[in-house]
Amino acid sequence: MENKTGSIKLEMNDGIAELILDNPKRMNVMDSAVLEEFDEIIGKVVENEKAKVVLLKSNSSKAFSAGADITEMQDQSPDEARKFSELGHRIARRLEKELPPVVVALKGYVLGGGVELACACDIRIASEDCIFSQPEINIGVIPGWGGTQRLVKAIGFAKAREMIYTGVSIDAHQALEIGLVNHVVPREELDSAAQALAEELSNKSRNALMAAKRAIRMSAEMGYEEALRYEIGEWTSLFGTHDQKEGMKAFLEKRKPEFEN
């Protein structure tokens, strides 16, 4: 199944929902129209109970995304800027909250809003030629799609402050060293590495994957004791499901489980 709307493409293959940034001529710069399309397509994935994992990637050879559209932002009023920021926040929040685990394949330039959206994903795989930057300070603003929060959670206060205050660029191996990405691979291996990980996750129980994602997220959104109690609730909710019974039975019988969803 394939659905294409403007600059975002959606493909569904065996439990993997592929979200493809598809505006290579502009290095996947995102204006309000693109964000609205992104929001619409995320909604389609949310509604699809067969989707076990999301694979976010780019059709541009030069970039994952060069970020938000400065041409659109230049003349925005404060009210218009707020709406644009809120739209970017909505996309990032849906990536981290509503979808199954999101694997993102990063290549080339990952700038500004591109970093912010990547930070909302669950597992980040980068090609060796990646260049990461939060350059907003150089045009008189700050990250506006959650970067001041998610970047801190990903790499810590010290490095996040440095990147945001200076707008410095870092390469893929520096990104790996500070925890911004999970893996770095040669450019020619990026698609296969991301696909292999997505396929591995697609063989898991969707119920368990979603429960794990929710529980992990709560470590950042709740107090420690409350988050521990939340984990107990998610753990408990899986018992009595087909996948829990099948998974444990298959383990004891030394065979591969056949999960229902």
Image: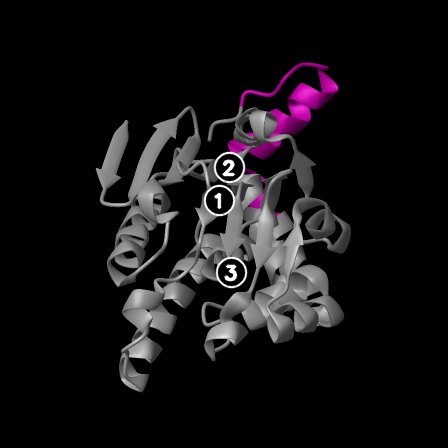
Between marks 1 and 3, how big is the CA–CA gap? 18 Å
Between marks 1 and 2, how big is the CA–CA gap? 8 Å
- Along the line of sight, which residue is nearer the eye, 112 or 82? 112
Q: Which residue is mark 1?
A: 100
- Provide residue 184's location: percent of width, then percent of height: 67, 38
Between marks 3 and 2, how big is the CA–CA gap? 26 Å
The reply to whether the C-beta atoms of the residues labelled 1 and 2 are less than 8 Å apart is: yes
Mark sitting on residue 153: none
> Does residue 259 lie above or below 157 as drawn?
above
Whichever of labels 1 and 2 marks the residue nearer the N terminus, that label is 1
- Provide residue 116's location: percent of width, then percent of height: 51, 60
Q: Amino acid at mark 3?
A: Glu
Mark sitting on residue 206: 2
The reply to whether the C-beta atoms of the residues labelled 3 and 2 are less than 8 Å apart is: no
* Secondary structure mostly taken by the magenta-highlighted segment of the chain: helix
Helix, strand or loop status at disc 3: helix
Q: Residues within 10 Å of mark 2 (few under 14, many from 20)?
A: many
Furthest-bottom residue in this view: 78
The residue drawn where x is 77% and y is 50% is 177
Q: Which residue is mark 3?
A: 116
- Along the line of sight, which residue is nearer the eye, 102 or 58? 58
Where is the N terminus found, in terms of image quarters? top left
Whichever of labels 1 and 3 marks the residue nearer the N terminus, that label is 1
Q: Is residue 48 magenta?
A: no
Q: Tell me which segment is drawn in magenta.
A: 236-258
Q: Amino acid at mark 1?
A: Pro
